[in-house]
Image: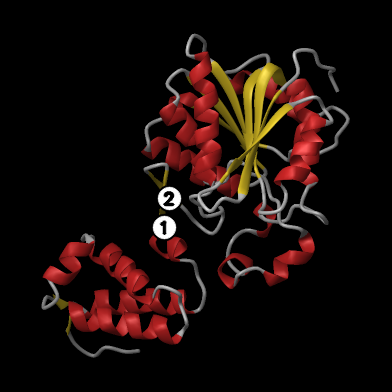
């Protein structure tokens, strides 16, 4: 679509709705409105109150470019560059997964556990931090804590660092580039306990992770917005989707304090399997449902005696 001159806000909005509807986007009115509000930096109410306002050709062209990208499957959040999570504003790019509401259940579970330990500084490890939505939310809402956040992607860590700065919790976090599945003999995971750059020493009181959990064979069948645009490395959990759970549970035996919390987000049909994996290592495990009633979070308290691996 090309626009030769000025156009009213209402007409531009209608063009966006029509294009998204033709592209079979589920909520064309909502999404066309979100994009227009972001473009003009106005709230939804003003979108209708200023319907007769004339929009410049430059802004109109940018809006229609956004509409075209959305029609082609680019997620809304990658276009606007933002996603709300735990009532905080997170910047997102194609280098990170888009934060989802279901993951708030994981954060809330950890916060509830932290309320039992208000008398000490909690050391928290977030494995696969991505945008930093989990680690930063924990740093923001748990006043007496320090969070070490690791990710294999340097670009993802840059996004997380910028979010920590914007939300003003940078002094409560340390970001480390690391492959949790690495099996080098010297064990690069050791720097979590030994490197001064982490600002934390000894055992973690909490380990939390929303790891890649999609079975490799299911990725081609995901919704196109996820399959074609979100980072595959943050999705692929191996043949059965459980690679990261197995490894993190194994690593936690030497990283987690006695009586500490290990908490995961899981796929829609994985919670009970992950619970069994944790129970085999003597964790006292509970399952928490998401808002749709689907088992979504698996959380376990580590045994009071443990073996180092």
Residue 94 screen position, x and y as percent: 54, 59
Which residue is nearer to you in this view: 167 or 269?
269
Do the residues bearing badges 2 and 1 touch, measured as CB atoms within 8 Å? yes
Q: Which mark is residue 236?
A: none
Please tell me which residue is depicted at 16% across the width and 71% down the height of the picture: 48
Residue 224 screen position, x and y as percent: 59, 72
Please tell me which residue is depicted at 27% across the width and 83% down the height of the picture: 14
The residue at which mark 1 appears reads as: 81
Helix, strand or loop at mark 1: loop
Specify the color scheme: secondary structure
The picture quadrant where one finds residue 238 is bottom right
Please tell me which residue is depicted at 26% across the width and 78% down the height of the picture: 13
Which residue is nearer to you in this view: 204 or 285?
285
The residue at which mark 2 appears reads as: 91
Question: Label 2 vs label 1: CA separation?
Answer: 6 Å
Furthest toward the right, the residue is 185
The picture quadrant where one finds residue 250 is top right
């Amino acid at each position: 679509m090309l626009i030769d001159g000025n156009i009213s806000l209402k007409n531009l909005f209608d063009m966006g709705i029509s294009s998204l509807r033709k592209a079979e986007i589920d909520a064309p009115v909502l999404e066309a409105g979100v994009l227009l509000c972001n473009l003009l930096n106005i709230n939804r109410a003003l979108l209708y109150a200023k319907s007769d306002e004339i929009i410049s050709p430059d802004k109109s062209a940018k809006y229609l470019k956004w509409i075209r990208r959305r029609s082609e499957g680019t997620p809304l959040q990658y276009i606007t560059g933002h996603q709300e999570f735990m009532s905080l504003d997170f910047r997102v790019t194609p280098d990170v997964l888009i934060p989802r509401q279901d993951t708030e259940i994981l954060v809330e579970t950890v916060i509830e556990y932290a309320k039992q330990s208000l008398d000490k500084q909690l050391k928290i490890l977030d494995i696969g931090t991505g945008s930093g939505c989990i680690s930063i939310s924990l740093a923001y809402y748990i006043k007496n804590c320090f969070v070490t956040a690791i990710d294999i992607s340097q670009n993802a860590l840059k996004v997380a660092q910028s979010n920590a700065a914007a939300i003003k919790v940078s002094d409560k976090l340390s970001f480390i580039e690391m492959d949790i599945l690495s099996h080098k003999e010297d064990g690069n995971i050791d720097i979590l306990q030994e490197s001064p750059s982490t600002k934390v020493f000894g055992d973690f009181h909490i380990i939390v992770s929303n790891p890649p959990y999609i079975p490799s064979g299911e990725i081609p069948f995901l919704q196109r917005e996820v399959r074609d645009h979100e980072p595959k490395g943050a999705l692929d959990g191996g043949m059965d989707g459980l690679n990261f759970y197995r490894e993190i549970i194994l690593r936690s035996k030497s990283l987690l304090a006695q009586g500490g919390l290990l908490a995961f987000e899981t796929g829609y049909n994985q919670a009970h399997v992950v619970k069994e994996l944790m129970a085999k290592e003597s964790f006292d495990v509970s399952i928490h449902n998401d808002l749709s009633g689907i088992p979504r979070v698996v959380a376990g308290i580590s045994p009071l005696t443990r073996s180092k691996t």
